Image (spheres, grey):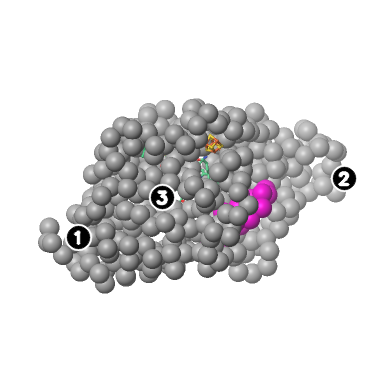
Amino acid sequence: MSDACVLAPAVLAELAALAEGVGLLRLGVVRLDHAGFAASAAALDRFLEHGREGEMTFLREGAAARKDPTRMLPGARSLLVAAVPYRGESGPIARYARTTDYHTVLHERLEVLEAELHARVPGVRTLVCVDTRPIFERAAAALAGLGFIGKHGCIIVPGLGSWFVLGALLTTAQWRGADAVGEDPAALAKARWDACGACTRCLDACPTAAFVGPGELDPRRCISYLTIEHRGTIDDALADGIGDALMGCDVCQEVCPYNAPRDREARIPEAAWIPPPPGPARSSDPWRLIDLGNAPYRAWAKHTAARRVTRRAMQRNALVVLGNQTGPLTAEQRARVERIGDDDPPVAAAARRLLRRRG
Ligand code: B12
Ligand code: SF4
Ligand code: SF4
């Protein structure tokens, strides 16, 4: 490795200041050979052993690269990680999904950081990572000193809470500074839910009892998975817990005391927020979503993370939500549901459930 490919603390400080200006907050760095990643790899193995990935086959397929990022970027040695905040009120569509698609926003911001890194570290090679690449993002954020992993599994930055997404830059630069989090057991324990203390609010509040233990989720029971990643029929027992959620779920973060401080928004520079998507406000009325055609659905989901949810899955979700409401359907509503037909089994099952309960 050439000496040029070194990331020195002074350069990181410069980059962190620049990053803050483009809305990449709390930039930190972690060595890929940090001992803390061993716990992540073990957690992933346990997760896969239990088949918790469900339909998220990318987690199994990407496991080897996650454990060894040099498979994606030969010579990779460090990860730069930053947080990008989002805001909004609680609603049937999770907050992050009501903003402009974070993948696009983070990609653009990380490309700016990438160019600044290249200008300061000649010869460095990099790879922008926003979900689409298999990276231990939460572990990296905790080990790079951004915050800690809460019992709900999300990263919490004291003072900012957990309403942000993470973006990373995989680099071949060797970090020459001190580790933000030490490798000894006491330091590693602090990277997890140490600062949660005796609190278990998130674990207790989960509507579908998706937590197996602190920081350990079974996504197959998680509303976020069921409404976004899962394409099949939603079991009746889980459908009840979905309540009014059309896409994603914020419950475990809503109840967290680290998200309570009202002055949080004032601490965040205006330009850092992920902006709302362009175009008119998206309706979250389930009746509008049960029989939208392809083109109107594409227009509805455009520019947001809802693009990840197929039209059929959203139709299913909307029918589940309507099935969770009370009161009999009007004749017109009933006719609309009956017209849906049964060519898509998960949609048909959700329609039958709705008619059974409110028909
Ligand atoms: C697949 C996925 C999901 C799945 C499965 C989630 C899960 N918990 O596994 C589903 C669809 C359910 C989901 C839901 C959500 N997700 Co998601 N999801 C991911 C994704 C792509 C991979 C997560 C993963 O690897 N899961 C596998 C399990 C084994 O990993 P894990 O739960 O993260 O656990 C790790 C740590 O516990 C760690 N660990 C264990 N022991 C120890 C010990 C030490 C010392 C250390 C340091 C680490 C460590 O190792 C594990 C493996 O990395 C990440 C992006 C990414 N590339 O990482 C986003 C990501 C985790 N999701 C994110 C978000 C925002 C959400 C939702 C809030 C969205 C919503 N509103 O609906 C919910 C939150 C649900 C929850 N409580 O976790 C953000 C989290 C941001 C944050 N502040 O932490 C991420 C990082 C995306 C991003 N780019 O910002 N998600
Ligand atoms: S996102 Fe919702 S369903 Fe998933 S673990 Fe959190 S509270 Fe439970
Ligand atoms: S709700 Fe309580 S236990 Fe859960 S992450 Fe927040 S502080 Fe930790």
Give the percent coordinates (x, y) of residue 347. Answer: 65, 42
Tag 2 secondary structure: helix
Give the percent coordinates (x, y) of residue 61. Answer: 35, 42
Q: Which amino acid does label 1 sit on?
A: Val
Residue drawn at (33%, 33%), measured in percent from left and top?
186
- Does the image show residue 145? yes
Give the percent coordinates (x, y) of residue 29. Answer: 32, 53
In this view, the mark in front (2 or 1): 1
Q: Which of marks 3 and 2 is nearer the N terminus?
A: 3
Is 230 above or below relative to 163? above
Asked if the residue at tag 1 contacts the one at tag 3, i.e. Cβ–Cβ closer than 8 Å, the answer is no
Residue under label 3: 146
| Residue 93 among those drawn in magenta | yes
Which residues fall within the magenta stretch?
A: 87-101
Asked if the residue at tag 1 contacts the one at tag 2, i.e. Cβ–Cβ closer than 8 Å, the answer is no
Residue under label 2: 331
